Image (cartoon, rainbow, N blue to C red):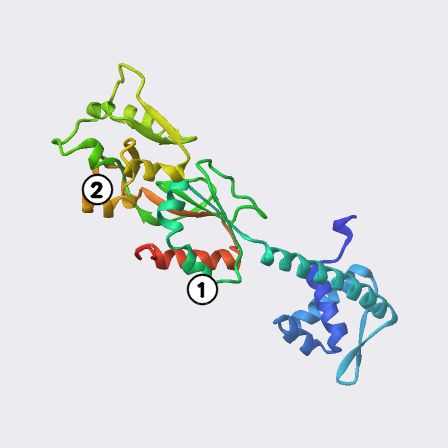
Amino acid sequence: MKWRDLPSLASLRAFGAVAQTKSLSAAGRELNVTHAAISQQIKSLEAHLGLLLVQREGRGVALTPEGLKLSEGLNEGFSRIAETIEALSKANANRPLSITMTPTFAVSWLMPRISDFREKHPDIELMLNPTASLVTLEPGGVDLAIRYGDGDWPGLEAELLLPSNYVVVGATCLVGDAPAFKPQDLLQFPWLQELGINELSLWLQQNGVVAETRPNVTELPGYMILDGVRRGHGITVMPKVFVLSEVEAGTLRVLFEDIRSEGSGYYIVSRPGVIRPPAKTFISWLRAHCCAPAMG
């Protein structure tokens, strides 16, 4: 198809509206433009084709034989376009809302609250993907991600949902009530680390800790980490926000707090541009619950 040989879409839309309404003024109202703008578009289309398409008839207009033939072709073409767009829009609207987040966020924050979303929005089908991997957001795929960081992901939009810095935390039954620990002291304890990440190595490096022997590390799926810490199976590095209540209760103890740059925390991450209605609904729900207590 030679696209440059085709008239402008604006002139074809103007002609289609005139053919349907038999009035320049009515066509202008349909397209939310002036009568003069419709007239100019028709003249431009006629000049492009070298044909007279519309002529005056009483208070309105009528189509010439050439105009009638063009109108029939446009009706068929625009109808196919409208049907295709409607089908695509329905398919997109009915597609499950796909969200990725870290397993820790899923277990510690989202799942205790998700029943509230389901009760309020039973029409929205959710597809939740807890994973430590950085999932690419692509059209027709994952709609939203909830990521921990400083909000700097090039090419994506990020909104801070849950501010938090990292802490090293352990059960009181494991670490006891000894005075404040130095980073090097923490190597005496077993560590629990989420599969697929290297938070322990990063933490040791950032705090200048050199291990003389290989640290005692057990790697687990993210959803098992906090339960293992609570049972005294090891200490771990995780966002402070998820253990605050248990630290205050005395069952867990913060051994070391990593004061990171301002702005660290969990972010709602999306692609630039138009966001699907179900995703907008979920984002609004997240905002409303970011400071609310867990359900149940």
Q: Position of residue 184 (x, y in %)?
A: 21, 23
Q: Position of residue 51 (x, y in %)?
A: 84, 65
The CA span between labels 2 and 1 is 34 Å
Q: Position of residue 267 (x, y in %)?
A: 38, 46
Q: Relative to 99, does residue 91 appear above or below in the rendering? A: below
Residue furthest top as drawn: 212
Residue 148 shown left or right of residue 84 in the figure: left
User: Residue 50 sits in which quadrant?
Assistant: bottom right
Residue 27 shown left or right of residue 173 in the figure: right
Tell me if residue 284 can be seen: no
**Amino acid at dot 2:** Thr
**Amino acid at dot 1:** Lys
Q: Relative to 249, does residue 76 appear above or below in the rendering? A: below
**Residue at x 73% of width, y 73% of height:** 18
Q: Which residue is mark 1?
A: 120
Residue furthest left as drawn: 179
Q: Nearer the viewer, residue 48 or 129?
A: 129
Tell me if residue 265 can be seen: yes
Q: Which residue is mark 2?
A: 251
**Residue at x 40% of width, y 37% of height:** 222
